[in-house]
Image: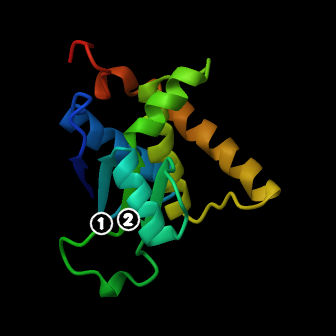
Amino acid sequence: MITVNYAWQTRRLPRPRRSELKALAARAAVLAGLPDTDWELDVRFVGDRAMAAANEEFVGHTGTTDVITFRYFDDPESLFPGEPAVELIICVDAALREGAAREDSSYARELVLYLVHGLLHSAGEDDLSPGPRRRMRRREREVLEALEPEFDFGSIFPERGSPG
């Protein structure tokens, strides 16, 4: 069983619905091709400042980004109980911007896309060159299309002022 832990590190937006988020993340991990065995997924939802600091510290890039992925499956024996096999840092502010700017998206859909994107990276997908990038985009669409009938993204990630 995949154990999902998360930290919501912004006060500007409502917290996601805990049980639905955990179910969504576990299902997305399996759809992304990660093992359906006992392991832990840690997800941190942060704002632009925290993401920019993490991007600089861990990736060596300046500025913010949508998601940063850490995968520790390469050596499962080195993981102690309670240690994550995958860690994601997801930028809530990026989701707000992109969700508002893209006609075919929303804040909630962007957050789920970033979650899926990070999980696909954890499953070995890459998007650094054109061929793998096309495959990554196709896999993102496939996973999102499989999740949509099962989960109400807007209910899991309510925007400010939304009932929740």
Residue 99 position in % (x across, y down)? 51, 26
Q: Earlier in the sequence, mark 2 or mark 1?
A: 1
Q: Secondary structure at mark 2?
A: strand
Q: Are marks 2 and 1 in contact (CB under 8 Å)?
A: yes
User: Which residue lies most toward the right here?
Assistant: 130
Q: Nearer the viewer, residue 156 or 63?
A: 63
Q: Nearer the viewer, mark 2 or mark 1?
A: 2
Of the residues shown, which amino acid type is indicated by label 1? Trp
* 103 over 17 or under it: above or below: above
Q: Is residue 62 above or below residue 107?
A: below
Amino acid of disc 2: Val
- Look at mark 2 in the image and give the residue it sits on: 86
Quarter placement of the C terminus:
top left
| Direction from residue 19 to residue 133 in the image, left or right | right
Q: How busy is the neighbourhood of tag 1: few (under 14 within 10 Å), some, or many (20 plus)?
A: many
Q: Does any portion of residue 106 appear in the rendered image?
A: yes
Q: Secondary structure at mark 1?
A: strand
Q: Which mark is residue 152?
A: none
In the figure, 81 relative to 2: above or below? below
Placement of 125 over or under 146, stated as above or below: below
Q: Quadrant of residue 15?
A: top left
The label shown at residue 39 is 1
| Displayed quadrant of residue 150 | top left
Question: Which residue shows up at 42% across the image and 75% down it?
Answer: 73
Q: Is residue 112 left or right of residue 43?
A: right
Camera-side residue: 9 or 128? 9
Q: Quadrant of the N terminus?
A: bottom left
The residue at the point 54 percent across, 55 percent down is 120
The Cα–Cα distance between marks 2 and 1, rounded to whole angstroms, is: 8 Å
